[in-house]
C-alpha cells in the first residue's frame, strides 16, 4: 500500500527533489521502425519523461521527435538527455513531503481502521482539500508552495502558436 501511495503522491506535482537529469544509453539493436535509435529508459522512472534534449548544453531546446515503447525511448536523435521523475527513497524526502505522505496514508487507511466513513473524508480534506479544489488544496498546497520556493519561475520556451501565426 505505502509504495503505491508514495509514487502516486510523487506524480501529483513536479517535486524538485524527485527529478533527475541523465544521458540515456543507446541500445545496440535498431528499433526496426521509423526511428533510427533505441535508448534504454531508467528503471526508477515514474511516468513519461518531462523533457528530452539532444544536448546537455545550457539552453538546449526540448525535442519532441520521440516515442516510448515498453522500456525504450525511440528517436532519430544520436544523443539523448532526459529529465524525468523518479521513485525517491524515504531517506531523501524533505520533511514537508513526508508530512504530506502521512496525511495521504491516514486518508487511505482511516476508514478501514475506524470503520467510520467520515474519518476517511476528514483525512482526505487534510491531505488534498475539498472536492472543489480538485486535489490541489489541503496540505498538498502547502507542500507544493514550500517545494516551489527554492525554484525559479519557469519561462515558456516553446512559442509554437506565435511562430505559426507570424511564420
Image (cartoon, rainbow, N blue to C red):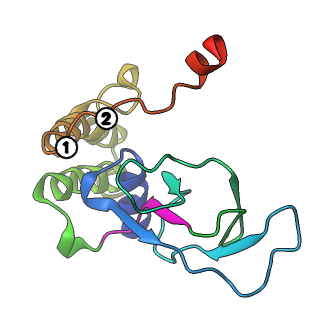
Q: From the viewer's perspective, tell me whether residue 153 is left or right of residue 85.
A: left
Q: Can residue 1 be seen in this view?
A: no
Question: Closest to the observer: 80 or 45?
Answer: 80
The local secondary structure at tag 2 comes to loop
Question: Closest to the observer: 93 or 66?
Answer: 66
Image point 72% across, 62% down: which residue? 76
Question: What quarter of the picture does the N terminus occupy?
Answer: bottom left
| Pointers 1 and 2 in contact (C-beta within 8 Å) | yes
Q: Position of residue 100 (x, y in %)?
A: 22, 50
Q: Position of residue 136 (x, y in %)?
A: 33, 31
Image point 78% across, 69% down: which residue? 36
- Residue that badge 1 annotates: 151
Give the quadrant of residue 119.
top left
121 vs 110: above or below: above
**Is 82 part of what is drawn in magenta?**
yes
User: Tag on residue 90?
Assistant: none
11 vs 120: above or below: below
Question: What quarter of the picture does the C terminus occupy?
Answer: top right
Count of labels in the image = 2
Amino acid at each position: 500500500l505505502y509504495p503505491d501511495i508514495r509514487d502516486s503522491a510523487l506524480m501529483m506535482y513536479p517535486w524538485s527533489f524527485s527529478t533527475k537529469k541523465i544521458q540515456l544509453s543507446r541500445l545496440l539493436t535498431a528499433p526496426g521502425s521509423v526511428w533510427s535509435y533505441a535508448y534504454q529508459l531508467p528503471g526508477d522512472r515514474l511516468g513519461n519523461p518531462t523533457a528530452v534534449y539532444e544536448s546537455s548544453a545550457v539552453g538546449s531546446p526540448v525535442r519532441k521527435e520521440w516515442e516510448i515503447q515498453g522500456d525504450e525511448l525511440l528517436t532519430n536523435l544520436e544523443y539523448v538527455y532526459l529529465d524525468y521523475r523518479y521513485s525517491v527513497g524515504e531517506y531523501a524526502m524533505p520533511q514537508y513531503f513526508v508530512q504530506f505522505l502521512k496525511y495521504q496514508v491516514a486518508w487511505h487507511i482511516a476508514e478501514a481502521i475506524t470503520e467510520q466513513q467520515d474519518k476517511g473524508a476528514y483525512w482526505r480534506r487534510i491531505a488534498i482539500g475539498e472536492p472543489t479544489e480538485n486535489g490541489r488544496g489541503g496540505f498538498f498546497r502547502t507542500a507544493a508552495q514550500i517545494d516551489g520556493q527554492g525554484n525559479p519561475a519557469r519561462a515558456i520556451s516553446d512559442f509554437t502558436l506565435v511562430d505559426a501565426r507570424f511564420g
